[in-house]
Amino acid sequence: MAKPRIYVTRKIPQVGLDILAEKCDVEVSPHDRPLARQEFLSAITGRDGILCLLTDRIDAECFDAASGVKGFANYAVGYDNMDVAEATKRGIPLSNTPDVLTEATADMAWALLFAVARRVVESDAVMRSGQWPGWGPMQFIGGDIQGTTLGIVGAGRIGAAMARKSTGFKMKILYTDAQPNPAFESELGAEFVPFNELVARSDYVSIHVPLLPQTRHMFTYDTFKKMKPTAYLINTARGPIVAEDDLVRALNEKLIAGAGLDVYENEPRMAAGLAGCSNAVISPHTASATVSSRNGMAVKAATNLIAMVSGKRAPDCLNPKIYEAT
């Protein structure tokens, strides 16, 4: 019997490819870049399964090109690149990679928080320039962390992990979400508040909601006007949650003290002027970039895809309704 034909849209850690190769004929894109749309559509034609990335748009056009496909496994925990409703209508399973990158992403949010609050990147640049004149009492004064208020926007897996890591700094935890989380409140003494109250009271606001129609541009210039001028914004979730042009304006006008960003509204591009904001720390979407997280994502994506092409239910299926009639 012929092995299932799998296409991987960009090289992933070898551990995942090895799992696939045990049971499938695997082809990996030779390009270390996102595939152009027509390249992508041509590559997935005639395949039984696709291991795709967040940069691949999985929609009706894609399903038409991959007629007969048995599933798409997303190498990401987020899946705003996937049209789940259309896939469900067509009976095509989709999956993601939850849990394995939770702690790494929360760690990165903390790295950004510390870096922007303590002006690490700014001071590093001065040292590298050879222009540091020596210690001075007014140099690179940043924000305090101990005993301040951390606002968590979205108390899911990553938001909760972010909050747990604050306990050593004796921070007050505020959070907002679609509904209160009594277990979260009990564990950390967190206070559930409306969004506008959270941004007004917090010294640090960390974003951990998925990208949905209702969260797109959740943060605008009006939002930044509500924040403390000493407050910092941290985003390791999805770029379009923040209106990036508005953020640049807010940073330049000192409406807020700074921002730490790992995601951007129009990746890989940044909003005009953001690179020139000395009160922003910007990293290139690397929150999950640890050995264990990236390997874990590869294993999960491969395991999900093998289940799909074998006619079994994917462990991390995003649209389980497709199995209800069977």
Image: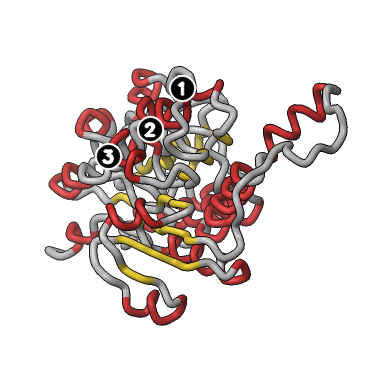
Q: Which of 198 and 313 is in front in this view?
A: 198
Marks 2 and 1: which is nearer the front? 1
Residue labelled with disc 1: 269
Outermost residue toward the front?
137
Labelled pair 3, 2 in contact (Cβ < 8 Å): no
Q: Which of marks 3 and 1 is nearer the N terminus?
A: 3
Instruction: Tell me the quadrant of the picture where the C terminus can be found.
Output: bottom left
Distance from label 3 to label 2 (Cα)? 19 Å
Question: How busy is the neighbourhood of tag 2: few (under 14 within 10 Å), some, or many (20 plus)?
Answer: some
Q: Nearer the viewer, residue 41 or 134?
A: 134
Q: How many marks?
A: 3
* Residue 161 seen in render: yes
Q: Which of marks 2 and 1 is nearer the N terminus?
A: 2
Residue 177 at what x, y percent from top left?
Answer: 29, 61
* Residue 69 seen in render: no
Distance from label 2 to label 1 (Cα)? 16 Å
Asked which quadrant contains residue 319, the reply is bottom left
Residue 56: which disc? 2
Question: How busy is the neighbourhood of tag 1: few (under 14 within 10 Å), some, or many (20 plus)?
Answer: few
Q: What amino acid is labelled 2 in the image?
A: Asp
Residue 43 at what x, y percent from top left?
Answer: 40, 26
Q: What amino acid is labelled 1 in the image?
A: Arg
Residue 153 at what x, y percent from top left?
Answer: 36, 55
Q: What element carries label 1?
A: loop
Q: Earlier in the sequence, mark 3 or mark 2?
A: 2
Residue occupying image coordinates x 31% and y 44%: 211
Q: What element carries label 2?
A: loop
Q: Is residue 21 left or right of residue 309?
A: right
